[in-house]
Each structure stands twice: as C-alpha cells, then as structure tokens.
Image (spheres, grey):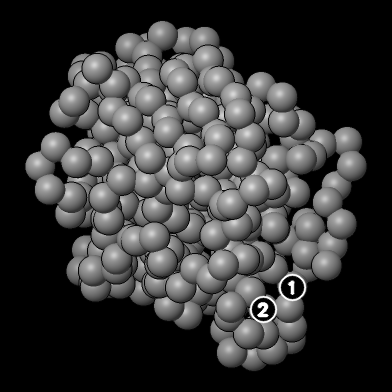
Amino acid sequence: MGQLWVIRLAKPPLWQLCCFAFGCACIGHAPLRLTVSPPHHMSSAVKIFQGRFGRVALLDMTAPLVGHAHHHCHILIKAGGADGAFRVRGELTPLTDETAVLVNAWEHHAYEHKAPPGERTLILALYIEPAWLTEIQRSLALSGHPRFFPQSTVQLNAATRKNVDEFMLELWWSDEVSPGRLENLLFELVIEVIDQFSGWRDLVSLLRHRPPASMDPRIRQAIAMMKQDVARELDVHALALQAGLSRAHFFSLFHRDTKVTPLIYANVLRFEAAVHRLTEGRDAVGDIATDLGFSASSHFTRFFRAHLGITPTDYRRKVNLFDAPADKATSL
C-alpha cells in the first residue's frame, strides 16, 4: 500500500476538488492528501521538473544522502511528513514546517534523515541555475557566489508558505502548466525566500560585501582537464603534477578556490553528465554507466542514489522537461 502524505496547503480559494492520475489527491475542506507508492525502504521521486531554470524535484526521502555539492543555488523546503535536517557548513540545519535550508553553489552538504524508523520526509528541492536568475534580474548575478546565502537556514513567513502551497498545486497539474507559468511561479518562490536577506537587489552593495572569488590559474586548468573526461578515474597526484604542485599544496588550493575536495568536484561533474544523458537521450542506463566510467550498472545506480536518493531509472521516468518560454519573465 502506498504512503499517504498529508500536505497542509493554504485556505480557500486554493482549496479545489480534483483527482490525480498517479493516485488520489482530493483538495476540499481538508489538507491535500497524496498517495505515492514507493518501496517501503527506498527514497523515491514523486515528480521532477527540468529546464533552463535548473531542476525542481519533489523527493520522498527515507534515507540519508552522502556529502555532495551542486553548481546550483539550492533551496530545500519541507512539503510534508516528518522533520528532516541537512548538514551545511559543518552544522546541522533543521528542515521543518517553519524553516527552509539554503545551500550556496558548490557548498558541501548532506541530507540526514532524522525521522523515526518507517517515517518519511517529503522535500521540495530547488536546484536553481544562477544564469537563469541573472537573465531575469541582473542583481541576482551573484546567486552563484559561494557566499550568496549568508546563512544556511531561513524562517518561512506566511507569504512564503502561500507561494510554496501554490507551487505545490501547480506541481500536480504539470501536464497542463506552461513553461512560462512554471518559471514565473518558481522565480516568485525564490524571491520570497531570498528577499529576507536585505540588499540582494543592490548589485553594487553585493559586490562590495561579496567580492568575486578569484581562482588560481593552475586550479582552473586542473578543472578544465577534469571536465574534458568526466569518466576518467580521478588521479589527484597526476593533476597536481600537471599543475606543478605537490599533492598537498594542490589539494589545499583546490579546496580554497572551489570550497570542495577534488573528489566531490569530480562527482558533481559525473552526476551532472549522468543527468544530461538520462534526459537528453534514450541510451540504456547500462550504456550510460559504462560511458561514465562505472565498471557495472549497479555501481552507477548506487552512485546516483547516494547523491539524489533515487535511481537513474526513476529519474528518467519521473522527469518532465520544459522548454524555454516564448516570453521571458519581467525583471523586478
């Protein structure tokens, strides 16, 4: 029997009556109840949207994730179930009905499933492309900065919760929502969250307090080499030798400039390459695994699940691809 989610959305006029194809979800004068049917012991994806904005995923989590990073600006909001937590900047950051978790681009973090045995946490995970935000609003050009979010948690006020509720409703009607509508809702939700940080609209002020991070040219060259062949097994000694540095000095400079270790960075490149292959083509998962340097398909599946909580097959099955809208969103 599927897990019964109880998601409390806003009061009328958002309450409506409907039935969804993947289960029964009736919105009347009661909370929205969503029935999903993953295996009891595994995390799964309810729905995933992917487009030039990045990714939006509704994840049904039952287990922790390994430490990882993204090039995206990352926002995590609890949508239902038990409270959870993320370890960000070395500290445990709660994910509750009242608080969201904020993760900067390339910031190391890990999900820690704090729910009692058998209980799940439904997470609305936003992986936002900084370039998309910049295109809409120039003062968001620093959204890819490693210190764009000055803190890793934020209180969700009534307006933000209302936007979350509206966005969640649109999620279930994904077959009907237009790319432009989705992007507008997503942008509004992101702004509701970051608007609590004063000064984001003032690019000059942001640059003054968060100057662009400079990267050592030797580390930039090493990253270029890593990108050329994401399937190649990481050899830190070879990269250091190519850069003319000792292994220890190379590792130190790499962490200083990217905020993550070479292994984490290489895993990000490989994971994003996997997402691209899964969504942009119909190659068999086993072929993708081989092309990305995994000795067995099961190793690829384990790697993918450890980073997102779901299998490559589940990702391909649940993802909804969105093209760019004809009209861009209006800048603020």
| Placement of the C terminus among the 4 image quadrants | bottom right
Residue type indicated by callout 1: Ser
Q: Quadrant of residue 286?
A: top left
Assign a secondary structure to mark 1: helix
* Residue 199 in view: yes
* Sequence-wise first label, 1 or 2: 1
Residue 133 drawn at (x, y percent) = 70, 58
Camera-side residue of 119 and 73:
119
Contact between marks 1 and 2 (CB within 8 A): the answer is yes
| Labelled disc at residue 139 | 1
Residue 110 drawn at (x, y percent) = 27, 55
Residue type indicated by callout 2: Trp
Camera-side residue of 160 and 244:
160
| Placement of the N terminus among the 4 image quadrants | top left
| Residue lying at 79% horizontally and 58% vertically, measured from the top left | 136
Number of numbered discs on residues: 2
| Residue lying at 32% horizontally and 30% vertically, measured from the top left | 4
Residue picked out by circle 2:
200
